[in-house]
Image: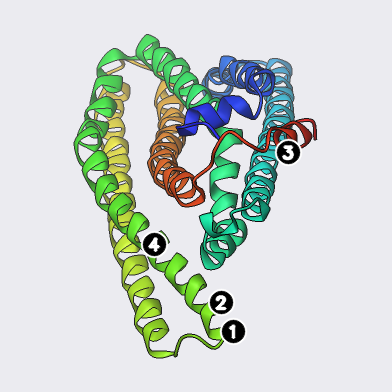
Amino acid sequence: MPSDLFGFIWLMGRRHQALIAGLSLVLFAIGAAPLELQRRIVNEATQRASYGSLLFLVSLYLAVAVVEGAIKFTLNLYRSWVGERGTLWLRARVLHQAETPPSESMLEGVELSIVLAEAEPVGGFVGTSISEPLLQVGILVTVCSYLIYLQPLMMLAVAATFAPQIAFVPMMQAAINRRVEAKVAIMRDVSEGMVHAIEGGQGEDPQTSRIGAIFSANMGICRYKYAMNFLMNLMAQLGYVGIFVLGGYYVVTGKTEIGTVVAFVSGLAKIVDPWGAIVDWYRDLRVTQVKYRLIRDAAKFDGGGNHEIRNISAF
């Protein structure tokens, strides 16, 4: 088993990661097209252009939306398949290791916890590990470049609302990671305690305190997670305020068209979504790194079991 998370990701298939990355490149390459079409449709309508040209632009917008949706569907399905392969490999590898003498290398309760609960989020991350940041950063660069081309000062006002997130997101995520690590350790103790209870070796009192500790850890994670979401949403709303203030001024003074303001409103939504996805990916990356390390340390993987690896990789 590779020593770090990204080694495991590469083990699950470089070719699949390359194909997923290719789909991501195609998807973010057309990211600015709907914004430009929206701007032109609004300007055509407000400037009383021919109805035929307006219908052509609307049809083109619909075609782009269909193509974009089809690519997203293919990308999400492919990433899910790759992620499920990673989960399958982890579960099979843990079971194979537990069956290999000496079986005491992994406690029964820990094995149960890994196979049923811990393997799925780690394996699932494989599908999005490379393509998600590539796709979302690509969308951000494409949309921001287009908005800068339209109106640099309005884009500067929008960008200023996202700057504080660079500071508070990593700090809050570090606090979440500590609670995730504690939660995983407690859940393993619960699984081990359940095995011992079946064998008649442990009472119920320790388990009661453990599930209470899991509750406390989960609530700590929720507090930080939703506080982070609140601050990020607040920053996004400040971005809309900046667009309305500056955009309204430019429209009133005749320095820009109403279609530009509409494009910025839609563009901010296209910035907020990928930015939030990048933060979610970063959050998943840090948490998954913790979980992968705990799985590897608990299982004490050695160099054996190569036959099992080949069988699962060929799936």
The answer to which of 45 and 261 lies nearer the viewer is 261
Q: Position of residue 81 (x, y in %)?
A: 72, 38
The answer to which of 11 and 44 lies nearer the viewer is 11
Q: Is residue 110 above or below residue 81?
A: below
Residue annotated with mark 3: 308
Q: CA distance from mark 4 to mark 1?
A: 20 Å
Q: Is residue 16 left or right of residue 163?
A: right
How many marks are shown on the rendered structure?
Answer: 4
Q: CA distance from mark 2 to mark 1?
A: 5 Å
Q: Residues within 10 Å of mark 2 (few under 14, many from 20)?
A: some
Tags 2 and 1 touching, CB below 8 Å: yes
Whether residue 66 is visible here, answered yes or no, is yes
Residue annotated with mark 4: 185
Q: Residues within 10 Å of mark 3 (few under 14, many from 20)?
A: some
Q: Position of residue 192 (x, y in %)?
A: 49, 72
The disc at residue 195 is 2
The answer to which of 79 and 37 lies nearer the viewer is 79
Q: Is residue 258 left or right of residue 89?
A: left
Q: CA distance from mark 3 to mark 1?
A: 30 Å
Q: Residue at x 67, y 16 (%)?
A: 50
Q: CA distance from mark 3 to mark 2?
A: 27 Å
Q: Amino acid at mark 1?
A: Ile
Residue annotated with mark 1: 198
Q: What kind of element bears circle 4? A: helix
Q: Is residue 286 above or below residue 261?
A: below
